[in-house]
Image (tube, rainbow, N blue to C red):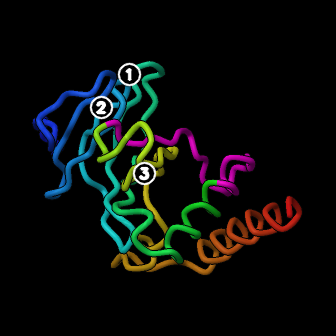
Amino acid sequence: MATPVEPPNGVWAPGKHYYRIWQTVFEVDTKYIPIKPIGKGAYGVVCSSVNRETNERVAIKKICDVFGNRVDALRTLRELQLLRHVRHENVIALKDVMMPATAPGFGGGGFKDVYLVYELMDTDLHHIIKSSQPLSNDHSKYFLFQLLRGLKYLHSAN
């Protein structure tokens, strides 16, 4: 579960609140209520949340130290540039981007972390593939069809 915590530097930023999720502090806009962690990977931690303004369930991915590695920073930039322009049922939707207000040097010096807000999916392909429930050929074909449809859309959008 997401646990409310004090800001890391002890100063509350207007419009922000702080939660601990899997030993990671999330600093998110007050319109989002983090609920529980749903994943952890090489680029950060993902939690499910609710947008208070729309009552929509979303996923928030915190990318820590986004500029610490040039290659990772470029990947994140490409992801942002791509997803902010595409709208397709087979490509995940980027809903919002947040930056922390409490970052060292904020207001001119930069920031370290970025929060990407996506539509919340019921599951992901990794969990389906690793599931003990066998996949029928029809299911495999349908998943492949969805992947190829999304890929075709991305290619057609350049």
First-in-chain label (1 vs 3): 1
- Write the residue at 35% across / 41% down: 100
Query: Real-space Cα distance between discs 1 and 3?
Result: 20 Å
Q: Label 2 is placed on what type of residue?
A: Ile
> Is 46 placed above or below 155 here?
above
How far across and how far down the image is residue 83, in percent? 66, 53
The residue that disc 1 covers is: 52
Q: Is residue 132 left or right of residue 57?
A: left
Q: Residues within 10 Å of mark 1 (few under 14, many from 20)?
A: few
Gap between marks 1 and 2, in whole Å?
Answer: 7 Å
Q: Is residue 121 left or right of residue 93?
A: left
Q: In the rendered image, which residue does mark 3 sit on?
A: 114
Q: Residues within 10 Å of mark 3 (few under 14, many from 20)?
A: many
Q: Residue at x 60, y 53 (%)?
A: 92
Q: Are marks 1 and 2 in contact (CB under 8 Å)?
A: yes
Looking at the rendering, the stretch of residues picked out in magenta corresponds to 81-101
Q: Image quadrant of residue 15?
A: top left
Q: Residue at x 54, y 63 (%)?
A: 76
Would you name the residue on which mark 2 appears? 33
Helix, strand or loop at disc 2?
strand
Dot 2 crowding, Cα within 10 Å, few <14, some 14–19, many 20+: many
Secondary structure under tag 3 reads: strand
Q: Quadrant of the C terminus?
A: bottom right
Q: CB atoms at circles 1 and 3 under 8 Å apart? A: no
Front residue of this view, candidates 42 and 91: 42
- Give the residue furthest to the top: 53
The residues bearing labels 3 and 2 have C-alpha atoms spaced at a distance of 17 Å
Q: Is there CB contact under 8 Å for labels 3 and 2?
A: no
Label count reads: 3
